[in-house]
Amino acid sequence: MQNNPTDPALLTLVIPAYNEADTLPHLLETLLAWCNQRNWKVIIVNDGSRDATRQILAAFNDSDVLEVVHHKVNKGYGGALKSGIRQVTTKYCATIDADGQHDLRDVEMMFEMIVREEADLIVGNRRGNKASGWYRELGKSIIRRIAKMMMPLKIYDINSGLKMYDTYLVQKYIQLCPDSMAFSDVITLTFVFQRNLVLEVPVHINKRLAGTSTIGARTAFDTILEIINIVTLFNPLRIFLPLSISCILVSVIWEIPILLKGHGISIGALFGFMTGIIFFLLGLLAEQLGNIRRLKINTE
């Protein structure tokens, strides 16, 4: 699908880059030529790189489709995406990685799909591609399972870096997202919680052009915390109600044999019951605070 160059641009590719001096020379020439043919725009965010990333980007300053944003310090994957997304002026935007793993043909297919289906978010599903390592696959599996425990979720690859958004909506929602790698998961959950049309499509993953991934165990732990945080915002009773019921049930089970022996109410049972009540009240309070914050987002 190639747009008429005289038509207004509809799509912007947002690419975070941190110490990607080895990959950018291989990526940019093909990427910019591809986007120039389709009248797409490209925003690359140099996230405080300490290598030659800035100098390499400067060599492409004459490109009509490229805009570069420089961070003085590293703000993180999510922070870089936020900076890029805020600069987007087209109806749609897509996020891809600077390591060359994403196939531009998949981006074009997703663009056709988001226009055709009038979707709000398209997620590139990497299932079936060669695993990057058993530890990373294990971490992704844990994250998916926890996310599905917290909410009904039909999307498989919530942390895919290849996504395509309705720009108006993603610019509203990014204020809820962290600056860390957890951005990918949280933005997907936000679209789902807001009952936007979220679709998923299989994509291909290429081998990194150069360099190594910086994702580790700390990333998975931070992501789990951020998932709990976003669920607490949109559906806090999903967390607090099970805790409340569990405490009350345990206290009742604890107390039954004590009552049967005629020893009255135990301190342990009373403590468990009161803890359950406190969790329930905290859930109600979190629900009210979440309503206020969500209302502010939806009215902006």
Image (spheres, grey):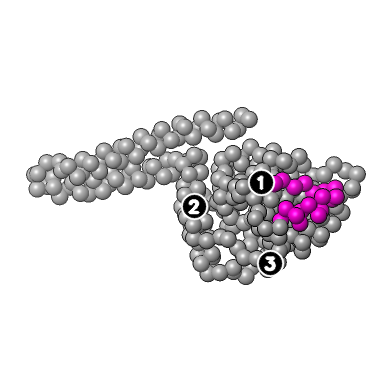
> Going from the N terminus, do you reach mark 1 or mark 3 first?
1
Label placed on residue 71: 1
Residue 278, above or below 126: above
List x then y, in percent, for residue 113.
Answer: 74, 52
Closer-to-camera residue (195/121): 121
Distance between the alpha carbons at the discs numbered 1 and 2: 22 Å
Distance between the alpha carbons at the discs numbered 1 and 3: 22 Å
Amino acid type of the residue tagged 3 in the rendering = Ala
- State which region is magenta: 53-71
The answer to the question of whether label 1 and label 2 lie on touching residues, with beta carbons closer than 8 A, is no
> Going from the N terminus, do you reach mark 3 or mark 2 first?
3
Label placed on residue 222: 2
Closer-to-camera residue (134/190): 134
Classed neighbour count for the residue bearing mark 3: other residues with Cα under 10 Å, few (<14), some (14–19), many (≥20): some
Residue 56: say if magenta. Answer: yes
Q: Secondary structure at mark 1?
A: strand
List x then y, in percent, for residue 116.
Answer: 76, 48
Can I make out residue 54 in this image?
A: yes
Classed neighbour count for the residue bearing mark 1: other residues with Cα under 10 Å, few (<14), some (14–19), many (≥20): some
- Look at 56% across and 40% down and name the residue there: 176
- Look at 89% across and 47% down and name the residue there: 5
Q: Which residue is mark 3?
A: 210
